[in-house]
Amino acid sequence: MVTLVDQIISLAEEAGAGVLNHYGPDVAVQLKEDRSPLTRADLASHTCIVSGLADLDPDTPVVSEEGELPSIEERRSWRRFWLVDPLDGTKEFIRGNGEFTVNVALLENGEPILGVVLAPALELCFWATAGRGSWRRRGNGDPEPVAVSGRTATEPLVVAESRSHPSAALEAYLDGLTVAGRVQAGSSLKFCWVADGTADVYPRLGPTMEWDVAAGHCIAAEAGACVVGLSYNGPTLTNGPFVVGPEGLPDPVAAGQRA
């Protein structure tokens, strides 16, 4: 039987194929009002996913980074909605390093209950649904379950960190941990590296948008990670500091406020 998550994976793969049609040297880049980059790949993926969700689930509203943002007055009554980042890691897409993803999440009562993160250039897909664990597929291989490393907050930890957003606040936060190593990655792959045990902890001390994190949040949590600092359907869809990893980590919100 084809499940909803199967359908969303297929939709993400369709969008990812469209993204790769625009991938390569000399990517045409525009700047949005907030000075963040926008490419034809972002728009093509947005169109594909929003259209596909309208066919699959016409009664559930969709919020996409590249779409018009509904007001909080309109969204306040939503119990369930889709949250989409058509191309997470646009900077990595422009640099050509492959570390960009297509993110699709389903939110219900303020929590991500389904998440798909597809890295089309890496032929790698992660997904999760609430209560059914987290899964990974490489290329055309079979799905395999993934789980966190199991290390505790007091043990030496491998840190997943942003390739594009280094910060003094992160370095201050890491002073409270025993760091065994560091893994840099773009986009929501950092959630996935915690989910499959490649890394143990992912602290983010700067702001993110909800569409950046919802799919990865679901995948990491279903793999056994503790996620602190994230909430959804806020007035501006912006989140502050958060951390993903074992229980008992230092408070990321307090660290962000000190920065």
Image (cartoon, grey):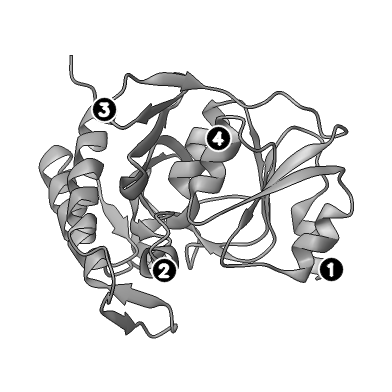
The quadrant holding residue 165 is bottom right
Tell me the residue at 54%/62% (across/down). Answer: 208
- The kind of residue on which mark 2 rests is Arg
- The kind of residue on which mark 4 rests is Ala
* As drawn, 190 above or below 236: above
Checking the image for residue 258, the label placed there is: 1
Which residue is labeled 3 in the image? 140
- The kind of residue on which mark 3 rests is Asn
Q: Marks 1 and 2: in contact by CB < 8 Å?
A: no
Tell me the residue at 26%/27% (across/down). Answer: 140
The quadrant holding residue 10 is top left
Give the mark count.
Answer: 4
Q: Earlier in the sequence, mark 3 or mark 2?
A: 2
Q: Earlier in the sequence, mark 3 or mark 1?
A: 3
Q: Separation of disc 2 and disc 1 at Cα?
A: 32 Å
Q: Earlier in the sequence, mark 4 or mark 2?
A: 2
Helix, strand or loop at label 2? It is helix
On the image, the x and y values in percent for residue 132 come to: 44, 18
Instruction: Please name whichever residue, 195 or 241, is drawn nearer the observer in this view of the structure.
Output: 195
Residue 179 located left or right of residue 205: right
Residue 103 visible here: no
Q: Separation of disc 4 and disc 2 at Cα?
A: 26 Å
